[in-house]
Amino acid sequence: MRPILGFVRKETLHLLRDRQTLAILILLPLVQVLIFGFAVRTDVREIPIVVVDPTPDVATLELRERVAASERFRLVAVAPSTRELDSQFQEGSVRQALVLPRDVERRLGRGDTLAVQLLTDGSDPNTGGIMQGYATAVLRRWHADATPAARGLRIEVATRMRFNPTLESAHLFVPGLVAFVLTIVSALMTAISITREKETGTMEMLLVSPIRPAAIVAGKVTPYIALGFVSVLLVLVAARAVFEVPLQGSLLLLLAESGLYIVTSLALGIVISTRAPTQRTAMLAALAGLLMPTLMLSGFIFPLESLPSPLQALSHIVPARWFLVVVRGIMLKGAGLPTLWQETLILAGMTVLLLIAGSRRLTIRLD
Amino acid sequence: MSQGLAVEARGLQRRFGDTMALDDVSFDVAPGELFGVIGPDGAGKTTLFRILVTLLLPDAGSARVLERDVVRDLWELRRRIGYMPGRFSLYPDLSVAENLGFYAALFDTTVAAARETIAPIWRQLEPFAGRRAGALSGGMKQKLALCCALVHRPEILLLDEPTTGVDAVSRREFWDLLGRLRAKGLPIVVSTPYMDEADLCDRVTLMQRGKLLVTDRPAEIGRRYPRPLLAVRGGSILGLLGILRRFPHAAAVWPFGAALHYTDARAGAAPEGVAAELRAYVASAGLGEVSVEPIAAGIEDAFMWHMAEEAA
Amino acid sequence: MSGPAIDARALTRRFGTFTAVDGISFQVERGEVFGFLGANGAGKTTAMRMLIGLLAPSSGSATVAGYDVATQAEQVRRRIGYMSQRFSLYEDLTVRENITLFGGIYGLSNRDIAERTGQILSRIGLQRAARELVREIPLGWKQQLAFCVALLHRPAVVFLDEPTGGVDPITRRRFWELIYEAGAEGTSVLVTTHYLDEAEYCNRISIMMDGAIAAMGTPSDVRRGLGAATLDEVFLRLTRPGAAV
């Protein structure tokens, strides 16, 4: 046991001595939360909107109130006709217009199809799409409440909204961020720290000692497991403090699943380090082989459904993909192991395979 | 006390791609002996050491260290060998004491248990115990590395180029430490590219291009120089060199500091006679008075002789 | 160029409160091979960096090839060659590519480069290896090649930082013959080395200690001055005054 403890102590010292790297590792989760939360946020607030309501009645008043009450919209005006709209859009004083037909309440009562026109400033297609989404959501909710019979018309949209009722993008990016940060801390740092020993020649001293390769790895990764947990907690706390991202499910389960993913990442780091001769190679391999897939192929940034099918297929071997489902499930849906056991099992299987692959490549000699 | 050989290498061979790093290397190291492997970079010293410390496998041949096979008895040997690799292999961000503590833990022991073994070295290192290893001078780094190699009280020391790149004074101090360890009966195998360090060993082997040129006591290697050797001094070195190399009986002429070492090609010739011939020859070439005197060959002379012979 | 190749006067460099080089004065004549010795950390590297114009002196002055190292660093650099054991040639380029590259850096014409490439390769016997990567050729050749490359633009002074570490004794002597040839052609050579026996090859040597020059002269003068048989002994007496020899 003493050799492993000695190792843990030494790795911890390395970690504490390298102030710059340590600072980066601790700040990284916080900065990422802020960057993704503020800069990359895909939700929009205070959209200047006009409601064109030629025949105001109880139903349209109700809709106008909903629009006015929402943080998303700033109700600029209620107009009787569309005459002013063109110039308002050109000025930019209005970015969205909700054009209602006549006799809304009567049509609703009859169960008629309601032809509502939604005009959106599409000069920035991304925000345009988002604004459209918000407005549609308000309309649907209003429509659904006003006509109880029409409830559940569009299942797909309804389900999405149920779990993110305010369409907060922060709620979606935080789980991805947990995976991203853990990949950096665990996989990248392990790979770098092992290859550093190769590069500086200290590996030679470790190899001639009676310590077994498995013990070297155990000693090496322990501090990074701890650091991984710290990072997860930092992301969660920051996300909660700044963006009020809720944690619906069990914290314990979330940490346990994170623990599993940390080991997966460490195993990936070990596999990389057994092949890479230098820190530089290890870093490039980790960036290209791990971080990019974690960002792109996990559903973190791009929804998996929107990927071309070869990439969708490829995403199945990206551990972060499964971890993301698990974290989103726990954090946003409050799901427990009964619903998430499949993903957990897949992740565990990958981890075992990676650990086997990594340990088979650990050598007891220099060649 | 009857003790087996500390090292017993038999026909070791190792190839890297097209390069024959070790070519039929055989030698013995007696118990308690300070044995030097002398050779330039690329001679194969590091490959030899790595095989002896179980880090590399030989392609052919076998080696026993402390009467244990370096391939089969890997784990036992790793506990009993003290090794210092050629490259500085400590953690620069850890302090002197932390480095030592780590290597002690690695061998499942403590620094306190090794106190007596490392005492002479630790005395010199102690004032710097809290300093980071990376901030030590070259000589101190090497002493720390030696200390780390000793912390598990090994039964043999294998040191690969411990004095390379270290200044002359630190080199001397390092060799003093080796002398003390040897006096306690610890067998030591040490490699070096510095020819002048050969004289500090009990026995040495001269190594070049994967082959052992000659293995013997240092004084004996000089004594066995097979040709008359003379030192020529005076005049311009470059001019003398050109002249002497054209002398019909010259086998080799090399600058040695301010002098030239001249080896005559005639094996049995009397050195005094050769000296007279050379003086006359140089004078006839118009280079004026030079001093020529027979000298005893050193390790470096012997190394160059064997190198040239090997190449021929 | 008239006057000495290197002329240092009370050259000093401080880093904060630490004085790395403490008022050293020395001259190196044209064609002289000057050994620049000292223990690790004695200030050799700092002094050398000032002489090649990489580091400004805190006080004092020095001229190299007649130009002031502090104010005319550009002219100085054009008239010096530099070779160190650590960096000299690009390992992933061939022998010929390295020569061409450095020739270009020193502003030689293509004809000059071609001519000197031929001269260098035949001088050190590397013709057959011209197309090989530098990393593939033996260390001894690498160092000789690096030295020739440092002389490519016919500099007035060439600085050699530990040029012969780890090479076999024959190659080391071939290297010194190259140095003597350069000296005979009028190039001054300033060389640092840890091989004290090698210092005996120099016309004159200086031994630095704690930033100052502790001894200077021909190797035999220095030995005689301290009543020592070898430079090794000289070194030991200077650096460890109390130590028994």
Image (cartoon, rainbow, N blue to C red):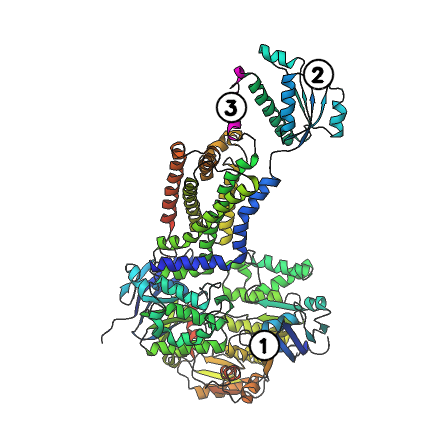
Label 1: which residue? Answer: C36
State which chain disc 3 sits on: A
Q: Nearer the viewer, residue A26 or B1?
A: A26
Label 3: which residue? Answer: A156
Specify the amino acid type for callout 1.
Answer: Phe
Q: Position of residue B214 (x, y in %)?
A: 37, 73
Q: Secondary structure at mark 3?
A: helix
Does A256 lie within the magenta span?
no
Q: Position of residue A148 (x, y in %)?
A: 53, 16
Graded by Cα atoms within 10 Å as few (under 14), some (14 to 19) or many (20 or more), the crowding at tag 2 reads some
* Residue B45 lies in quadrant: bottom left
Q: Residue at x 37, y 66 (%)?
A: B83
Which numbered marker is on residue B308? none
Q: Is residue C174 above or below residue C133?
A: below
Residue C203 appearing in the image: no
Tag nearer the camera, 2 or 1: 2
Magenta residue span = A148-167
Tag nearer the camera, 2 or 3: 2
Q: Nearer the viewer, residue C235 or A226?
A: A226
State which chain disc 2 sits on: A
Label 2: which residue? Answer: A54
Tag nearer the camera, 3 or 1: 3
Same chain for labels 3 and 1? Say yes or no. Answer: no
